[in-house]
């Protein structure tokens, strides 16, 4: 099956300097994708900037204005971990808009599966706060777009990044139309994601956290998927499945302590593909989040793309 590929050289213009979340991550991915043998069956989808109205589905107007001002004034940090440059606001708009294009394609006449090779990443970004290298919450904005522009009533977000997606969870904690399921290292940055965080109000039960200790391997992630994540997804029966695809749970990643292998990521991807086929007419959109071992990142993404295309 053809897979949508959302990438722009503009994403390299988010200049973070000597920083783990650098443009070298995307350069490694693009090189691996271009050299893949056999070649991948990718359909290029052009990202567009998210509008301010689309951003305001998740972020406050004051926060959007503050990020823009900080970037244009040449400030270098939005928080101790989150570096920006003059171009970062425009690049972040494009990263946020990539997911909206992928959603429109999946729910229209385009590819039902896509990979958003974007930066800056997004799942730590709160409604009014930049965190953990993230400016705008790309995956949350895509989910909000599916609800608002396509009138979906059940959107699921899976997150296997090694760090808990605090921003995504907080965006939908009281929203029964969005299921958020995360497997992550705990305790670890940002300190959220305990198993008793289950949402509140009408959204109680639609937050599923699977915290795992440092050193967890393929078997531990498989157990979390089989006992928590997959049953929750099957019960929820999403119309669209989104994935925060961070690859920093890979063994040897410099910012984490997990021991997932390429086989482990491939297995998790196959399970989510099966969920998408069972409930979403195959609609699965992946968003690049973390992954800082640039020697392995390109290969891991190529493997994930092959899972998405069903090969």
Image (cartoon, helix red, strand yellow):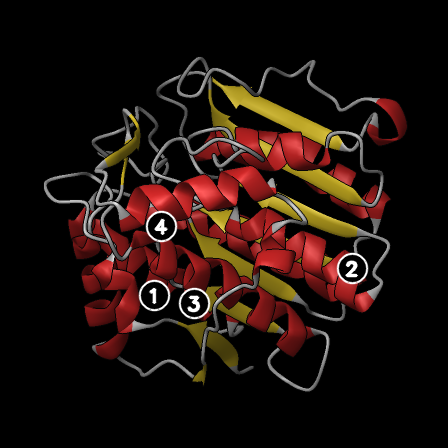
Disc on the earlier residue, 3 or 2: 2
Residue 21 in the image: x percent, y percent? Answer: 24, 43
Q: Distance between the Cα atoms at labels 4 and 1?
A: 20 Å
Residue 178 appears in the rendering: yes
Label 4 vs 1, first from the N-terminus:
4
The label shown at residue 148 is 2
Question: Where is mark 1, residue-wise?
Answer: 302
- Residue assigned mark 3: 305
Disc 1 and disc 3 in contact, CB within 8 angstroms:
yes
Please identify the quarter of the rendering in which residue 1 is found. bottom right
> Residue at the spot x=51%, y=74% of the render?
309
Badge 2 local density, few (<14 within 10 Å), some, or many (20+)? few
Of the residues under marks 4 and 2, which one precedes in the sequence? 4
Which residue is under mark 4? 120
Residue 78 pos. (x, y %): 33, 33
> Which label sits in the foreground, 3 or 2?
2
In this picture, is 125 found above or below 104? above
Picture quarter containing residue 276?
Answer: bottom right
């Amino acid at each position: 099956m053809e897979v949508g590929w959302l990438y722009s050289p503009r994403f390299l213009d988010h200049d973070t300097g000597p920083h783990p979340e650098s443009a070298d991550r995307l350069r490694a991915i693009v090189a691996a994708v271009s050299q893949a043998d056999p070649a991948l069956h990718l359909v290029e989808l052009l990202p567009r900037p998210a509008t301010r109205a689309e951003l305001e589905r998740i972020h406050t107007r004051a926060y959007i204005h503050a990020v823009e001002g900080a970037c244009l004034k040449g400030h270098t940090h939005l928080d101790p971990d989150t570096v920006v440059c003059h171009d970062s606001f425009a690049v972040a708009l494009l990263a946020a808009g990539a997911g909206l294009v992928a959603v429109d394609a999946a729910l229209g006449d385009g590819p039902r599966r896509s990979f958003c090779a974007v930066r800056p990443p997004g799942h730590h970004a709160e409604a009014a706060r930049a965190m953990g290298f993230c400016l705008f919450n790309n995956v949350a904005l895509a989910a909000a777009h599916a609800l608002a522009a396509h009138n979906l009533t059940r959107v699921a977000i899976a997150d296997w990044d090694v760090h808990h997606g605090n921003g995504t969870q907080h965006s939908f904690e009281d929203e029964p139309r969005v299921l958020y399921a995360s497997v992550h290292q705990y305790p670890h940055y940002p300190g959220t994601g305990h198993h008793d965080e289950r949402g509140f109000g009408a959204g109680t039960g639609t937050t599923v956290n699977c915290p795992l200790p440092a050193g967890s391997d393929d078997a531990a992630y498989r157990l979390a998927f089989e006992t928590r994540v997959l049953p929750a997804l099957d019960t929820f029966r999403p119309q669209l499945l989104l994935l925060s695809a961070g690859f920093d749970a890979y063994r040897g990643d410099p910012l984490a302590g997990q021991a997932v292998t390429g086989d482990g990521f491939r297995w998790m991807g196959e399970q989510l593909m099966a969920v998408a086929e069972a409930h979403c007419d195959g609609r699965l959109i992946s968003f690049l989040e973390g992954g800082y071992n640039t020697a392995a990142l390109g290969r891991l993404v190529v493997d994930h793309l092959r899972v998405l295309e069903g090969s």
